[in-house]
Every structure is written in structure tokens, then in C-alpha cells.
């Protein structure tokens, strides 16, 4: 299915500059924001919801009038939005028609280790993989992407990524925008570079990772979206390889942060800017008068990053993301709910269980080894992981299977935008992040989960480790896999 709508548009209008003062459309005539289709699914007699995803190669019109070779799921770029409810059992038939091994990882999902889609669940060319699991976590905006060790950056950069929405009773009952693609809008943001002939430029710009000079949103250069209501809910994903985004509106209007990686916040948080590092999500709502316009923009980073030479990492860059245009007949949104979803904190007196120091593409002095288990966690354990970035490079930290709560940053409580459920957190250099999480299992002595920096070049280079969840007295039964297909380092 084509995600990118073709339109013959003047090229000059697409490289939009930023109009900061009056909120006027920055590039009238740009294309409509493509909306990834909702995935088809069917529920069988046993109540299992079935999806299928086929990783495939194709061509996409990322820039108007230019055909670019890309990879996607069920289409040429990105993938459909999967949607399921808490309590449902889902099954996904994943097929790889690409010329090399890939995998499909459910980022943010509490999922049995054998279904996680990490680097041990590789799909050879032509192979099919059918993970199935019961959704047992709150409503949230999750995503899926490949995780082949050493080649994740390349696979994601070529276009493989999609959203996975979870709903529950509580989210059903909240008066929030919920019309998919109308006022509840998926916004997958990533950066790319192009060669002169319109191919994705995969030349490594530095050992830091691929940093693009063009922002793409849902697989196309920035466009507009016509909003049938006076409130938009934007489900933002930073799907970049390396770029850290600071998002806000060109007219500096405020917005409400309603959810972070793992679900809804206790109450809407009024903000002007939200920072998202690769892999992080945020749901925001923004209000517009009928007939008015505003533009979501990626600003030079002003929230604290702790980085000395920000230009090196694209922190000074500026891009338009999406122009929202409320129609003149836009329906009036009700008051925003005052409370959203309660969050029960973990016991505050828990001691730190483990420390993780990130430096030189390593965690605690070791590079990822597919054949080494770095740590084991007892089923049901609540742990505090203390994580530090020990160099002047941007890094973040992502843990599979769980959502965590930040207990402290340098012993201080986290700011409200970091106080909800998270699975990925940006690490300012030289600060200590204490993450509290519970590993409910099930135990699996044979299949590890990953933790890693989500800047994809760093992950590929080895800034990753593996853990097993084990029942009391259970021994690891993890078999090193000499024959494992590892497309290492061919980017
Ligand atoms: Cu989004 Cu281990 O990945
Ligand atoms: Cu990193």
C-alpha cells in the first residue's frame, strides 16, 4: 500500500524555512501528511487477533517527484499501525522478503523473551516468524522495528518502522481526540540524507551515526494536515538513528503532554517544548482556533543536554515538522481531562541493584557479545538500575520488556515530562539516572532481552547487553549460536 501520496508540487516550496513570528503556514502547498494505514487484523475463534507484516523492498516518493529505493512493511516505507487492546492475545505473521536477514522487535512491549524480536529472533530471507503474546500493559504508543545485531541502523534508515497502539478501558473512557488520522495523528519523525540521484545516502557521516539534513515525517518531507477539530492529539515518535529532537510550535503556543513511552501521565503537563531522543515517544494535545494554523518545529536544542560541542551532533539544526490547519468548521474540543492514568510508584526505599556506565561503545567496559549473558534477573524482582553516560557524546538507554519509572536524576526527582512510564531515556553526560522497574516474567532461561543505547550506530557498534529472567534455582539454558546469521558491519 502506498503511504506517500503523489502530487506534482513545485520543489522550491518543499524545503520549508521556519516562520517563527505569526504562525502562518511556512510552506503553503506542501503535500498532505501521509498517514500510515491501520493494520488489517482478524480475530479467530479463540479470540486471538492476527496481524501480518511483510518486510519488503520498494520505491517511495519521500521527496516530491523523486523515487527513492526504500524498505517497508506491507508497503515501500514504514509500516501499518498495529492496534490492540489490553487483555487481547495477538499473533503476528512476519515474513521477510528482503535479500538479507532482519527481525521485528516490539519496542516498549511487555512480551515473552522468545517473542521479543531482538537479535536472537532473526528472520532469514524468505522465512516466516509468528510470535504470539497476551497484551498486559496500559494503553500506550509503542513501535516496532528491526533489531539485527550490527545492522539495525541500516534497516531502520531504509524505512523499516511502524507504530503499535495499545488501548485499554481507561483510555477508552477519557475525552481525548481518538479519530485515527483525523485528530489522533501518528507522527513518525526521522532524518535522512539523499545522494544527488535521490537514493538514501548511507555514507557514514561519522562514527557518531547517520545524521540527516532532511527531516521526514511519516515517510515524506514535511507537509500539512487539515484538522477537523480544534484539538489535535499528536503521537510523536523520534525514529531517527542519532538525532535528538526538541519539538515545539513556531508561534511558541503551549501544548499538553499527556503520555510518554509507556502510557498516559497522571495529568496533562503544560509545556512549550518536548525533547525526544531516538526511540522515545510522546503524546501531546494542541489546541487551534477554527481556520487557524500552527507549525510543529524541531528547534535547536535548548533543554539541557550537557554536551559541549552541540553542532557536531546536529543540536543546532532547525526543521519544520508538520503544519496543522484547523478547518473553518472545526468542531470544538471539550475541556481536557484533569486526570489521566494514576501511576503507582515503586517503593522509594529500594536499594540500587546494578550500575550501567556507558562509554566508548561499551556498557560497563564490555561490547555486546551475542554469546554472553551479561546479567540475570529473578522473576518478579523490582530493581533499581543506576545508569550513567561517562563521555561527552549523546547517549540514551533503553530496556526491553519493561517500562520503568525514573526515581531520580542525580538524587533529584525527575521533571514532570520524565515522571511517567518510560522505556528509553536520554542520558545527560555525567549525571546519574535511577530507573525503577519490575520484571514480571515469565522466566525464560534460553532467550535473553536486550538493554542498550538507542542511538542506532552505537547499538550496532556494541553499546548493548543481554539479560535473562530466571525463576529461583533455574539455571541459564542459553545456547551460544555460532551459526547465527549476523550481518555485522556491512553498512
Ligand atoms: Cu527500539 Cu532494542 O530497541
Ligand atoms: Cu549512544
Image: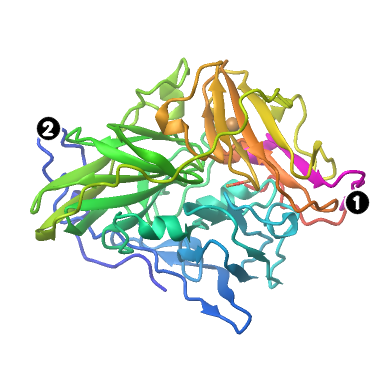
Write the start and end of the magenta stretch as one range.
459-481
Horizontal side of 245 relative to 370 (left or right) equals left
Q: Position of residue 199 (x, y in %)?
A: 44, 55
Of labels 1 and 2, earlier in sequence is 2
SS for dot 2 = loop
State the residue at coordinates (85%, 44%). 371
Q: Which mark is residue 477?
A: 1
- Between 417 and 374, which is closer to the camera in this rendering? 417
Looking at the picture, does residue 188 appear above or below residue 388?
A: below
Between tags 1 and 2, which lies in front? 1
Q: Is mark 2 within 8 Å of ligand 2?
A: no
Q: Report if the beta carbon of the residue with label 1 is closer than 8 angstroms to ligand 1.
A: no
Image spot of residue 353 (x, y percent): 74, 27
The residue that mark 2 highlights is 21
Residue at 40 percent across and 64 percent down: it is: 60
Q: How is the image coloured?
A: rainbow
Q: Is residue 203 depicted above or below 71 in this figure?
A: above
Q: Position of residue 277 (x, y in %)?
A: 47, 36
Query: What residue appears at the point 50 percent right and 40 percent down from the top-left corner?
Result: 343
Query: Is residue 308 at least partly visible in the picture?
Result: yes
Q: Which mark is residue 266?
A: none
**Left or right relative to 31: residue 161:** right
Element type at marker 1? loop
Residue 102 x %, y %: 66, 59
Of the 4 image quadrants, the one containing the N terminus is bottom left
* Contact? badges 1 and 2 (CB < 8 Å): no
Query: Can you say whether 95 is above or below 25 in the image?
Result: below
- Classify mark 1: residues with Cα within 10 Å, few (<14), some (14-19) or many (20+): few
Cα distance in 3D space between marks 1 and 2: 61 Å
Q: Is residue 159 left or right of residue 335?
A: right
Amino acid at each position: 500500500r502506498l503511504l506517500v501520496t503523489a502530487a506534482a508540487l513545485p520543489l522550491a516550496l518543499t524545503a520549508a524555512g521556519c516562520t517563527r513570528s505569526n504562525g502562518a503556514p511556512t510552506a503553503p502547498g506542501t503535500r498532505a501528511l501521509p498517514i500510515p494505514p491501520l493494520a488489517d487484523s482478524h480475530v479467530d475463534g479463540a479470540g486471538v487477533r492476527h496481524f501480518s507484516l511483510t518486510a519488503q523492498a520498494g520505491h517511495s516518493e519521500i521527496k516530491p517527484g523523486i523515487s527513492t529505493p526504500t524498505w517497508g512493511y506491507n508497503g515501500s516505507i514504514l509500516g501499518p499501525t498495529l492496534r490492540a487492546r489490553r487483555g487481547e492475545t495477538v499473533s503476528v505473521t512476519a515474513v521477510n522478503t528482503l535479500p538479507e536477514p532482519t527481525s521485528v522487535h516490539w519496542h516498549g512491549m511487555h512480551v515473552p523473551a522468545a517473542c521479543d524480536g531482538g537479535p536472537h529472533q532473526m528472520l532469514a530471507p524468505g522465512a516466516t516468524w509468528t510470535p504470539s503474546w497476551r497484551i498486559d500493559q496500559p494503553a500506550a504508543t509503542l513501535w516496532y522495528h528491526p533489531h539485527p545485531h550490527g545492522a539495525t541502523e541500516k534497516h531502520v534508515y531504509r524505512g523499516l518502522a511502524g507504530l503499535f497502539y495499545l488501548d485499554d478501558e481507561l483510555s477508552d473512557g477519557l475525552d481525548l481526540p481518538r479519530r485515527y488520522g483525523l485528530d489522533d495523528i501518528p507522527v513518525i519523525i526521522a532524518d535522512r540524507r539523499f545522494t544527488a540521484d535521490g537514493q538514501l545516502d548511507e555514507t557514514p557521516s561519522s562514527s557518531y551515526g547517520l545524521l540527516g539534513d532532511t527531516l521526514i515525517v511519516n515517510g515524506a518531507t514535511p507537509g500539512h494536515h487539515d484538522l477537523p477539530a480544534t484539538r489535535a492529539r499528536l503521537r510523536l515518535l523520534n525514529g531517527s538513528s542519532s538525532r535528538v529532537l526538541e519539538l515545539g510550535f513556531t508561534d511558541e503556543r503551549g501544548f499538553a503532554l499527556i503520555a510518554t513511552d509507556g502510557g498516559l501521565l497522571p495529568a496533562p503537563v503544560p509545556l512549550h517544548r518536548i525533547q525526544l531522543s531516538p526511540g522515545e515517544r510522546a503524546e501531546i494535545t494542541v489546541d487551534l482556533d477554527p481556520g487557524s494554523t500552527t507549525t510543529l518545529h524541531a528547534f535547536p536544542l535548548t533543554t539541557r543536554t550537557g554536551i559541549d560541542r552541540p553542532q557536531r551532533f546536529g543540536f543546532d539544526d532547525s526543521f519544520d515538522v508538520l503544519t496543522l490547519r484547523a478547518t473553518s468548521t472545526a468542531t470544538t474540543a471539550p475541556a481536557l481531562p484533569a486526570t489521566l492514568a494514576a501511576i503507582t510508584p515503586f517503593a522509594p526505599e529500594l536499594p540500587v541493584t546494578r550500575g550501567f556506565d556507558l562509554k566508548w561503545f561499551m556498557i560497563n567496559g564490555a561490547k555486546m557479545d551475542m554469546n554472553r549473558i551479561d546479567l540475570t534477573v529473578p522473576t518478579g524482582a523490582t530493581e533499581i538500575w543506576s545508569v550513567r553516560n561517562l563521555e561527552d557524546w549523546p547517549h540514551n538507554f533503553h530496556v526491553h520488556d519493561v517500562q520503568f519509572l525514573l526515581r531520580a536524576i542525580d538524587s533529584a526527582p525527575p521533571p514532570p515530562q520524565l515522571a511517567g512510564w518510560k522505556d528509553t531515556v536520554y542520558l545527560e553526560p555525567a549525571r546519574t539516572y535511577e530507573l525503577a522497574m519490575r520484571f514480571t516474567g515469565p522466566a525464560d532461561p534460553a532467550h535473553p532481552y536486550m538493554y542498550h543505547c538507542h542511538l542506532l550506530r552505537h547499538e550496532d557498534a556494541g553499546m548493548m547487553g543481554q539479560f535473562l529472567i530466571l525463576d529461583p534455582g533455574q539455571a541459564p539454558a542459553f545456547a551460544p549460536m555460532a551459526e547465527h546469521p549476523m550481518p555485522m558491519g556491512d553498512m
